[in-house]
Image (cartoon, helix red, strand yellow):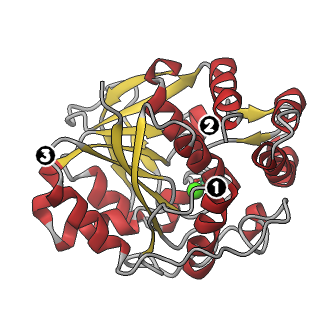
Amino acid sequence: MPPHKIIIDTDPGQDDAVAILLALASPEEIDLLGITCVAGNVPLDLTSKNARIVCELAGKTNVKVFAGCDRPMGRDLVTAEHVHGKTGLDGPNLPDPVMPLAQGDAVDFIIEQLREFAPGTVTLCPLGPLTNIATAFEKAPDIKKRVAKIVLMGGGYFEGGNITPTAEFNIYVDPHAADIVFKSGVPIVVMPLDVTHKALVTKSRNDAFRALQTSVGIAVAEMTDFFERFDKEKYGSEGAPLHDPCVTAYLINPDLFTGRHINVEIETQSELTMGMTVADWWGVTDRAPNATFMGDIDADGFFDLLTDRLARL
Ligand code: BDR
Ligand code: CA
């Protein structure tokens, strides 16, 4: 099978960084057309800088990195420095990027790429708020039927939320964008907190990254060292959850994940439950399924894959 042509839409973020590194290390399965950045974990100037820092860490300076939307569609931006640190990529000491941002806007790049390649051949991989993707769908509705699928990190059902009791961060930041995407008719695969909270960097997994003794292995160990304190304090969990790499791992080996094809709607009205992914896991409504909502992961298989691939960089 030819590699999946993908666009990673992202707000790095340490876990976004690991997702990008996994994609860059996996050319047999992933043909990365470009990285589009969005405001989320930190403001856009930092996410678009961090994406380039990560490409340079991997020695892939020819990747196109675009800046996109600097705020959600209908709400003020909420950021997550309390999780990711002031830079969004706190932990390792990495140099400022030398590679420039690509000319043009991320939203236009998404539209152009979907129009350029044959319908059903480009997969979108959102790792942050869905603002760029929804803006592209609003600006160019013709592209929706050309998207192969969307594989995204966001939402939660059994785990509830991580930014409010009911909402996961990426969906909460731009619920209106999420609503547009989930209603778009494009096939969607969702990696919710139910899965990503099982992808924990335990001490031995962190040691395995460090033992690679490469700049990438050491940087990933330092990123997860930093990023774990939030989840350890909040959930008493064993280490940092690698949310976003579940998306790129799925493209390499979908058998690592299991889930259900169900209806998922986004709450956009109630302040109390804003951004909740109302997932009909038990099929209690007759609403049509619109997403494959994952529920479980082979965590050992996931970390074996990740460590093997990072060793290549
Ligand atoms: C998601 O929010 C961000 O903090 C992470 O990068 C991930 O995409 C987890 O809720
Ligand atoms: Ca992210």
Q: Amino acid at mark 1?
A: Gly
| Residue located farthest toward the left when viewing the structure as drawn | 142
Q: Is residue 272 above or below residue 292?
A: below
- Residue at screen point 51% across, 67% down: 173
CB of residue at label 2: within 8 Å of ligand 1? Answer: yes
- Viewport quadrant of the N terminus: top left
Q: Position of residue 109 (x, y in %)?
A: 30, 69
Mark sitting earlier along the chain (2/3):
3
In the displayed structure, does residue 18 sit left or right of residue 87? left
**Foreground: disc 1 or disc 2:** 1
Task: Identify whether 231 is placed above or below 42.
Answer: above
Asked whether disc 1 touches disc 3, contact meaning CB atoms under 8 Å apart, the reply is no
The residue depicted at 58 percent of the width and 81 percent of the height is: 45
Which residue was labeled with disc 2?
196
Kindly indicate whether the residue at mark 2 contacts the one at mark 1 (C-beta within 8 angstroms).
no
Residue 22 on image: x %, y %: 59, 41
x%, y% of residue 222?
Answer: 85, 51
Dot 2 crowding, Cα within 10 Å, few <14, some 14–19, many 20+: many
Q: Is residue 92 left or right of residue 294?
A: right
Q: Residue at x 63, y 25 (%)?
A: 305
Percent across and percent down for residue 247 are: 49, 40
Packing grade of label 3 (10 A; few <14, some 14-19, many >=20) is some
Q: CA distance from mark 2 to mark 3?
A: 30 Å
On residue 119, which mark appears?
A: 3
